[in-house]
Image: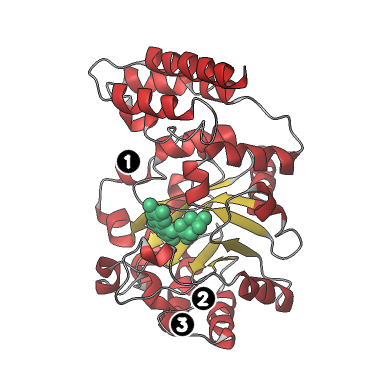
Amino acid sequence: MTQQAAAASRYAESLRLSVAPMMDWTDRHCRVFHRLLAPTARLYTEMVHANAVIHGDRERLLGFDPVEQPLALQLGGSEPTLLAQAARIAQDWGYDEVNLNCGCPSDRVQAGRFGACLMREPALVADCVAAMVAAVDIPVTVKCRLGVDEDNDYEVFASFVDRQAEAGAGMVVVHARNAWLKGLSPKENREVPPLRHDWAYRLKQERPALPVVLNGGLASVEAVQAQDGKVDGVMLGRAAYHDPYLLHRLDTLQAGSPLQSRQDLLRALRPYVEAHLASGAALKHITRHILGLFHGQPGGRAFRQILSEGAHRPGADWALLEQALVVTVREGDRAAA
Ligand SMILES: Cc1cc2nc3c(=O)[nH]c(=O)nc-3n(C[C@H](O)[C@H](O)[C@H](O)COP(=O)(O)O)c2cc1C
């Protein structure tokens, strides 16, 4: 198999499990860590506005380590020509996919006329998708909600998706709840509007040729396994971040590969951490993403505490992680005794 064919097949397989785009969370350090845990998953960047891609500091906004691939850049915006330009830049940087955000409900995003409010503008979104598809060879995908505010019509949601598929979107990620544009914070908008996974199932059933990924509230192996056969894949956000070992369990189950211990996975991150420190950067930029590695385990609290307190100190290095591991394992042994 050529290198290109291998990458294409890895990308196609990664549809089954992805880690959601999350602002301030899924930065490049986080993604390298998630990649170690989930070698076959598809990873997403934080949302970046098309204007920032075009005019901003590209190394800071778009730079990634090849180990992160398969990797999608999530774009925000609603101007077809800008999005097309940004998609082209993403392709040139080596991204495997560009994804258009039609789900973010924040006031700032609404004011800029992008994110979730685009659910009410299917024709404009289709123009954006078509412009991006015309500009690149990599897949263009859409992440959306079921609707906004009081919308409660499955047909309206399905016709939004159809428009995007007709415009060339290769896959849709359904965050299976509405976004309420007035009166709820973005955080509440991930919790309060009720989940309706059945809309995603119906979408898939009625449109078997369209790849559909389900997102929203999936937080255990059982919850993910319950989606088998109903959708093409799942996307995990908060659970993947707060309990990253869950990602490892899901990935190994899907890939049929052996489960590694949390300690071994963490130690596999050492070369990356040391290269980061050698470049003059601080340990805390990486450790903030790994605090949840021992989530729910005896010693998990000590692990989190040692890292969150120690990583801020000047000169903090790999030894802190070893120290955290020693204490965590000791506490685990004590709890088991
Ligand atoms: C801190 C945070 C930041 C987020 N930022 C984005 C974003 O940039 N783009 C996006 O499409 N969704 C964003 N989301 C929403 C997630 O991608 C996901 O749709 C949502 O959390 C529901 O999935 P979950 O229940 O698995 O967490 C964010 C969520 C969180 C918790």
Residue closest to the far front: 337
| Amino acid, disc 2 | Leu
Ligand 1's image quarter is bottom left
Tell me if 228 is positioned left or right of 130 in this view: right
- SS under mark 3: helix
Picture residue at 36% right of the left edge, 22% below the top: 306
User: Residue 212: in sight, yes or no?
Assistant: yes
| Amino acid, disc 1 | Glu
Residue topped by disc 1: 59
Picture residue at 47% right of the left edge, 39% below the top: 31
Tell me if 324 is positioned left or right of 231 in this view: left
- SS under mark 1: helix
The answer to whether marks 2 and 1 mark residues whose Cβ atoms lie closer than 8 Å is no
Residue topped by disc 2: 146
Image position, residue 258 (x, y; %)? 73, 29
Q: Is residue 248 placed above or below 298 in the rendered structure?
A: below
